[in-house]
Image (tube, rainbow, N blue to C red):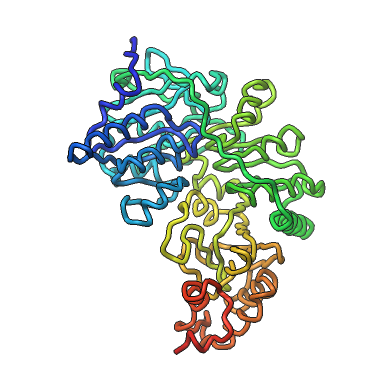
Amino acid sequence: MSFTILSAAEAASFVKHGYTVGISGFTPAGSPKAVAPEIAKIAEAEHAKGNPFQISVLSGASTGDSCDGVLTRAKAIRYRAPYTTNTDFRNAVNCGDIAYNDIHLSQMAQEIRFGFLGKVDVAIIEACDITPDGKIFLTAAGGISPTVCEKADKIIIELNSAHNKNIAGLHDVYQPLDPPYRREIPIYKPSDRIGTTYVQVDPKKIIGIVEVNIPDEARGFTAPDPITDQIGINVANFLVADMKRGIIPPSFLPLQSGVGNIANAVLGALGRDKTIPNFEMYTEVIQDSVIDLMKEGRIKFGSTCSLSVTNECLDEIYRDMNFFGDKLVLRQSEISNNPEVIRRLGIISMNTAIEADIYGNINSTHIAGTKMMNGLGGSGDFTRNAYISIFSCPSVAKGGKISSIVPMVSHHDHSEHSVNVIITEQGIADLRGKSPLERAKAIIENCAHPDYKQLLWDYLKIASKGQTPHCMKAALGMHAALLDKGDMKLTDWAEYTK
């Protein structure tokens, strides 16, 4: 079957007001980049005429500015799930202009299949190749592409020549059956492959191909600083100590790492510590630091959903597929973040927090409890099911005006029941086997910044008796002080116990 070649504007004309659009990618990697800006132009034109035009957007995770950014600025998004990192989008969400649903990334595809999120009208998929019989070869990420292709009435392909066709060999496309017919997912080590290298669709659903040559909107990260370096060293020291105690086997266990500067610093420290054997990763996002460690032989294999690397790094992978071809696999988020597989493989999860409270509860998503920063992402998928779950963050933020260790988190993403270890540049709080009060003492003593340590000890003194001691009037007192005075440093808890 031959496919119609469309311009991006012609393809966008198939998207109507009220439609739900499913897109490929996971982070800017693998996300379509040409059609969404044309949808934004349609929205702007319709709004100028006084007509409504808004769509719902479903994806694997975040996208680039050419999707979330341009559509937000055109006021073209009504509903969005499950995750984003775009600044304009974040501002629109916090102003109430976009209905944003923050969903565990492992659940996104099946919630679409189960019908929880309604009908998918159009799927826009970035591909490096396509065959006449409907085999779509994805680019730098798995995301939720098989599911949105299955459920969409129409499919638009962005055939992006910026991606080498060799990347098709990295994909392992597998979609589990839905209940009551679901079986075990047969992954027993990170390198296992269980699917195909392509997404198979009915070619009659493909309404056209948009030919583009647009690189991924890759995000770089700043170099590690003394604080992130120390956090990385503390994480490495903790894992080495657990190995010496026999808690972690001498062959080590696969790692999951979040995204950002702290994650890069942690991986760098693990790579430098030769006490830790060469290891594997079973994660959702691979960054440049992983590829560097792979070239050094420190990382033996990486299973991921997304190559969220710089374009220079991605080009290096493409140029040397003889080396990387048997060291990487790209999965869908439903598989890369799957709780069953995470629990089976014994993943050590390492994620970052906005704030942690003295009992081990974690806020990953909201500033001061109300303003969305990004979203939960896959941290819950891994934390709840990990062999060991670790959260790290600097002990203070905003020049010391904010403590990352507080009496009670202002928004609750991960409960104390799922969090094993909290690490800051100040030290390590191992929470395993401890009661709530014992956890509080460990976190305050080992993780809190010296400027806030006594303040937190004083809070424990005024907290009521009970299994988890709290003074409910004062529990968010440090946050109230920040709102009142621009600084969390209280001089007297009495002001917040009246």
Answer left or right for 444 relative to 194: right
The residue positioned 45% from the left and 48% from the top of the image is 87
Above or below: residue 87 compared with residue 133: below
Q: Position of residue 269 (x, y in %)?
A: 74, 49
Task: Name, please, the residue furthest toward the right.
Answer: 274
Q: Position of residue 379 (x, y in %)?
A: 52, 52
Name the foreground residue: 343 vs 356.
356
Residue 69, horizontal then vertical, whole percent = 41, 40
In the rendered image, the quadrant that contains the C terminus is bottom left
Q: Residue 278 appears in which quarter of the rendering? A: top right
The answer to whether residue 114 is above or below residue 465 is above
Asked whether residue 441 is in view, the answer is yes
**Which quadrant of the figure contains the N terminus?**
top left
The residue sitting at 71% across, 53% down in the picture is 225
Q: Is residue 160 shown above or below 457?
A: above
Please indicate whether residue 24 sits to the left or right of residue 383 in the image: left
Q: Nearer the viewer, residue 48 or 191?
A: 48
Residue 181 visible:
no
**Residue at (42, 19) in percent of width and height:** 135
Q: Nearer the viewer, residue 92 or 26?
A: 92
Q: Position of residue 155 (x, y in %)?
A: 32, 25
